Image (tube, grey):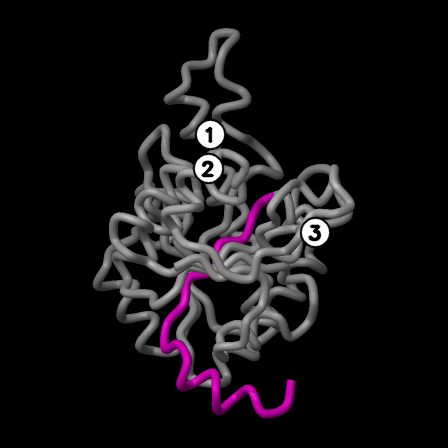
Amino acid sequence: MPGYAILAAMAYKRVLLKFSGEQLAGKYEFGVDPEIAAYLGEEIKKVTATGCQVVLVVGGGNMVRGAEIAGHGIRRVTADQMGMLSGLINSMAMTDIFEAHGLRTRCLSMVPIPLIAENYSYRLAEKHLQNGRVVIVAAGIARPYFTHDTAAVSVGLELDCEIVIKATKVDGVYDKDPAKFTDATLLHTMTLADAVSDGAIMVMDKAALGLALEQRKTLAVFNPMTAGNLEALVAGKVIGTKIE
């Protein structure tokens, strides 16, 4: 999108993007669609070309959702750990695909697993970002009962990201479910307090929204599958919904 490169450098210097496992599955019911990962890499390239640093958190819902598989002998803690590993698998795939397309990337795992990924630390993540690499933070926050959404806000706070951007399958936050109601209206802006208190707002879990509210961290919700949307959002244009 012509003209956005200069604006992008002024709007945000560092952002965190949360991408879901379901989106990564693309045309498949399970696993990773390489075309989706490659597309996302190209969209992130547009952002990093402006000098903006990008941190990525990827969910694992295309493989395991901890809360859904708990039971029948599987403890909730174990189920959540399986979900963390699903996010790590996705992060490993995206790291390779990004690098294959010329986007320098490092995968840092919250769960220590040095044969597969670098162990996450604040200082190591900072070093990679300062060296111009995309940093994928994998395996949630390595604790049960916390989703990848909450991990995204937590990591965004820790790494001083100016905004946490949640990618969704719809254009942003609506006043009602757009899949069920044809008269649903897209909300371009809303407050964090309203997002936390309104039970109809399900775009992020309440723990993630509550943490963002407590720490006054700005969020954005958008559809990444429209080419140029991420670049425009980082440039400061109103894309999707801004929650602040």
Spatial distance from mark 1 to mark 3, Cα to Cα?
Answer: 20 Å
179 relative position to 85: left or right: right
Residue at 49%, 11% (x, y): give it: 71
Q: Which residue is mark 2?
A: 85
Q: Are marks 2 and 1 in contact (CB under 8 Å)?
A: yes
Residue 10 is inside the magenta segment: yes
Q: Which residue is mark 1?
A: 82
Residue at far left of view: 123
x, y (%) of residue 14? 37, 72
Residue at 68%, 56% (x, y): give it: 34
Q: Which residue is mark 3?
A: 33
Give the residue type that dot 2 points to: Leu
Residue 182 is inside the magenta segment: no
Residue at 31%, 77% (x, y): give it: 130
Sequence order check: which comes first, mark 2 or mark 3?
Answer: 3
Give the residue type that dot 1 points to: Met
Residue 44 in sight from this viewpoint: no
Count of labels shown?
A: 3
Name the one closer to the observer, 242 or 121.
Answer: 242
SS of the residue under disc 1 = helix
Residue 41 in sight from this viewpoint: yes
x, y (%) of residue 118? 34, 54
Sequence order check: which comes first, mark 1 or mark 3?
Answer: 3
- The quadrant in which the N terminus is found is bottom right
Magenta highlight range: 1-21
x, y (%) of residue 114? 33, 48
Name the one closer to the observer, 160 or 126.
Answer: 160
